Amino acid sequence: MRCINFWLILVFLISAVGCKKSKTKPENSVDKKFAIVLHGGAGYITSDNLNDSLQAVYKDVLMTAINKGYTVLENNGSSIEAIRQTINILEDSPLFNAGRGSVFTHNETNEMDASVMIGNTKDAGAVAGVMRVKNPIDLAIQIMQNSPHVMLSGKGAEEFASQQGVKMVDPSYFYTEKRFQSLQDVKEKESKKTAYINPTILDEKFGTVGCVALDKQGNIVAGTSTGGMTNKRWNRIGDSPIIGAGTYANNATCGVSCTGWGEYFIRGVVAYDISALMEYRGLSLHEAAQEVIHNKLPAMGGDGGIIAIDKAGNIVWEFNTPGMFRASQKEGEEIRVEMFSKN
C-alpha cells in the first residue's frame, strides 16, 4: 500500500511540474498589444482653410510625434514616457495651441494648462496658468510623481517647476504672430460689439493637444496640454487640467484626452463620463464615445472631440466638429494620420 501511495505522489509531482512548464509566459511578461493615439485639436478644420502645402506641414509634425511615442512603446518603454515625448513635440510646434503655439489672453500673455493621469494607480497631476514652463506636460508629470497634490497653478506651480528642474523659458518664447493677430481680431470685433462669426477666430479655442498610450505592461496613460482660449480673462481655466473633464485614465476601462470648448467639457465631465458608461453600463469604448460626443455634449451646446484607448488596445477618436488633427498607431498596424471629418 505504501508503495502505491509513493508512486501516486510521484506521478502527481511530475504532473504539477509539467503544468508549470506548460505556461509559455509568466503573467507579467511584456507581450501585450500596445497602442498610441494623439490629437492636435478639433475645430473648423477643412480642406478649404488648409491648402495642400499646409496639410503636408501638419501631417509631418503629427507623423513625427506619433512615431516618437510608438518607438518608446515598441522598445518596452512606459506609457507615461510615450505620452510625454509625444506631447513635447506638439508643444514645441507653433502649429498647435499648446506650449510654443499657445494663444493669447486678453492681457496679451500666454497662460498654459496641462494634466496627466495613469490608469493603474489613478495617480494624476495637473498645472494651470503657467507662463514660463516650456513644456507644461512635463510639469504635470512632476506634480503627479513628486508632490502630495494633484493640481498646482500660477507662480506656485512655477516655483515647484524650478525646484524639480523643469525647463523654464522667457515668456517671449511663446509669442507667435499668428496667435497675436488672432487676439487683435477678437478685440476689434469685441470693441465693435460684433459676434464671433469668423471660423478662424472661433477655432482658437480648439487647438489643445493630447495623447493616450497603452504600453506592453497593459498600463494606460492619458495626457493633455493647452494654451486655452483666445482672449480669455481673469485667469480662466478650461477642462484640460481638470481630471475627469479633459483627461482621464483607468486600466479597467480606458484612457481619454479631450479637446474643445472647455466650459462644456467641464460641465459634462466628458473624459470620466466615457469611462463610466463603459464601467457601469457595459458599453464599448466606441459606443460610449459616440454617446457622449454626438448626443450628450451637443445637447449642452458643446463642440469638440476626444481620443481614447481601451484596455484591449482599441483606439477611438470622435468629434462633432468639421475636423480634428489626429494620428494613431497600434502594434502590427500602419500609422494613421487624419485631419478632416470621417463623413
Image: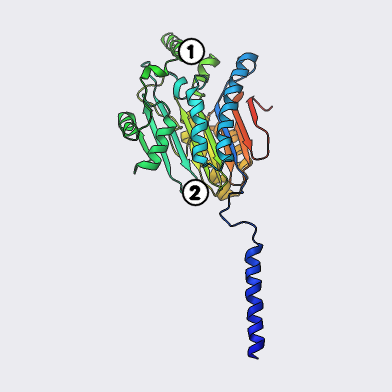
**Vertically, is 4 above or below 198?**
below
Q: Which mark is residue 332?
A: none
Q: Whole-percent x and y of residue 99?
A: 45, 24
Q: Residues within 10 Å of mark 1 (few under 14, many from 20)?
A: few
Q: Secondary structure at mark 2?
A: loop
In front here: 75 or 187? 75
Residue of label 2: 120
Residue of label 1: 178
**Is residue 261 in view from this perspective?**
no
In front here: 60 or 198? 60
Q: Is residue 241 left or right of residue 158?
A: right
Q: Is residue 323 left or right of residue 249?
A: right
**Is residue 77 in view from this perspective?**
yes
Q: Whole-percent x and y of residue 108?
A: 38, 15
Measure the C-alpha gap from mark 2 to mark 1: 40 Å
Q: Quadrant of the N terminus?
A: bottom right
Q: Residues within 10 Å of mark 2 (few under 14, many from 20)?
A: some
Q: Is residue 135 left or right of residue 311?
A: left
- The residue at the far bottom in this view is 1
Q: Whole-percent x and y of residue 163?
A: 31, 34
Q: Amino acid at mark 1?
A: Lys
Q: Amino acid at mark 2?
A: Asn
Q: Whole-percent x and y of residue 204?
A: 50, 20
Q: Which residue is at a point 56% across and 45% down the rendered structure image?
A: 277
